[in-house]
Amino acid sequence: MDPITLSIVVFIALFVLLALGLPIGFAMGVTGFVGSLMLIDADAALALLGQTAYETVITYNLSIVPLFILMGYFASNSGLSEGLFQACNTWLGHRRGGLGLATIGGCGAFAAVCGSSLATAATMTQVALPEMKRFNYDDRLATGAIAAGGTIGILIPPSVILVLYGILTETNIAELFLAGFIPGILTVIAFMLTISVVTRLDPEIGPRGDATTLRQKLMAFKNVWGTVVLFILVMGGIYFGFFSPEEAAGIGASGALALALIARTMTWQVFLNCLMETVRTSAMIFTILIGAILFNNFLILSLVPDAIGGWIQGLALPSTAILLIILLIYLVLGCALDSLAMILLTIPIFYPVVANLGFDPIWFGIVVVMVVELGLITPPIGMNVFIIKGMAPEVPLGAIYKGVLPFVIAQLLLIALIVAWPDLATWLPSTMAQFQ
C-alpha cells in the first residue's frame, strides 16, 4: 500500500475510533503507531513510541502547561471570580443587559489568570447565572453570555492552547501571549456590544440591575487588585524580559496561591484538590499531546504534509483564498472536535502550508485560536455549552445554542477583522524586542 493511500485509511480509522468513543489521545496514538508500523520495521516503530512518550514529558518548555493549569485552579478557589464579577457588576449592572455585560467583563478578567475556557465557563456559571436568574434574565441571554465569555479563556494570555501551538510550530510563546492580548480585548468589547444590541432589540431579556453610587464603584476595585497585580506581574515580566514564560508560569501559580491565602479561602483540602485536579488535567493534555506527536510522526513518514502542500501550491488560487479554505475546515471540525484535539490534529498538516504561503506564524496562531473558540459554542459538540448544561440542567440545550448565536456572528466578524488587519495581533509582540 502506498503511503498516501495508507494515510487515508489511517484517517478513516482515526475517526471511526473517535466515533466509537475512544479518547482522542489514545485514538491518535494507536492509529499513528499502527500507521508507522506499516511504513517502518517494528523495532523502529517501538523505539519511536518510547522516545516520543519519554521526551514529551521531560521537555522543559512543557513545564509551563501544568504550572498555568495550577495557577488557574488556585485562582478558581481563591474567590477571584466572584470579586471580578461583582466589580464588573457594580460598574455595569445598572445598564440594560448589565449582568450580561458584567459576565463578559468577569470572564475576560478571569481569563487573564486562568487560561482555560472550560474552567472560565464553569466558574462563571456558578457565579453569574444565579444572579441573572434573580433578575429574571432570559435563559438564552444568560447562558449564551456565559458560554461565549468562557471562550475568551484560551485567547487572553496565559493560554494553554497558545502554549501547545507554540511548541508544535516552534513559535515564540512569549510573543504568542502578547499577540493574544489585543484580540482578546476586542473580543470582550465585541461580546459586550452584542449584548447591547440584543437587549436594545428586546429589553425584556436583559433587565437593568440595581444602580450603585460612585463610592460603591470605587470600593469595588478592592476586589480586583489581586488579579491586576498578578496579570501585570506575569505578562509584564514576560514583556520586559525579566523572566521566561516557564518562569512566569511558576510565578503566576505562586502568586495565585498567595492571593488564595490572603483571602483565607485556601484550606489543606482545597490545596490538595487543586493539586489533584492539576495532575488529572495535565495527564489528559500530555496523553493527547503524545498521541498527536505519534500521529504527526506517521504523517511525516507518509509525506502527507508535503503532498498537501504540493497540491495546494498547484491550485490556481491566491494565498488568501487558501487561508479561507483552511479556516472553513476549522469551522467544520469545530462541530465535531474539541479545541485541543483540533489544534493537535491539524497544525502539523496546515502549518507547513501556511508557512510556505508566507503568513506570519504568530498571526496565524491567533486566528486559529479565534476560530477554535467558535468550536466551543457551536453544535453539536460545543464544550462550553455542555458545561453550562451540566451545571444548569433546567435550561434546555436548544435555548443555550440560540443564546450563543449572536456571539457566533460577532466572533465571525472579529475573525474577519483580524484577517484583514494582521497588525492587530502582531503589533504588540513586535514592540517586545526593544526591552529584551
Image (spheres, rainbow, N blue to C red):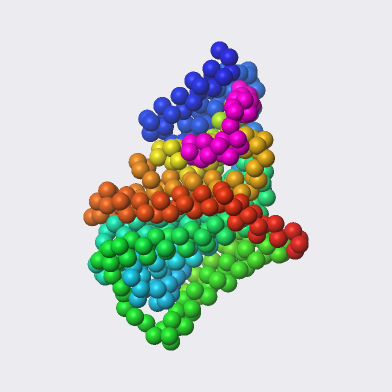
Give x and y (percent) for residue 346.
54, 36
Residue ranking furthest to the top: 1
In this picture, residue 143 sits left or right of residue 18: left
Picture residue at 58% right of the left edge, 39% below the top: 320
Magenta: main secondary structure: helix
Q: Quadrant of the N terminus?
A: top right
Picture residue at 37% right of the left edge, 65% below the top: 196
Picture residue at 47% right of the left edge, 52% below the top: 413
Give x and y (percent) for residue 11.
49, 26
Picture residue at 48% right of the left edge, 58% below the top: 187
User: Which image quadrant for residue 349?
Assistant: top right
| Front position in the image: 205 or 242 | 205
Q: Quadrant of the C terminus?
A: bottom right
Q: In this rendering, is residue 189 above or below 410?
A: below
Give x and y (percent) for residue 179.
61, 55
Residue 329 belongs to magenta span:
yes
| Front position in the image: 144 or 57 | 144
User: Which image quadrant for residue 322?
Assistant: top right
Numbered label tally: 0
Q: In this rendering, is residue 410 above or below 355?
A: below
Residue 86 belongs to magenta span:
no
In this picture, residue 301 sits left or right of residue 148: right
Query: Is residue 101 something one can see in this rendering?
Result: yes
- Highlighted range, magenta: 301-330
In this picture, residue 88 sits left or right of residue 320: left
Query: Is residue 68 something one can see in this rendering?
Result: no
Give x and y (percent) for residue 174.
66, 55
Q: In this rendering, is residue 63 above or below 311?
A: below
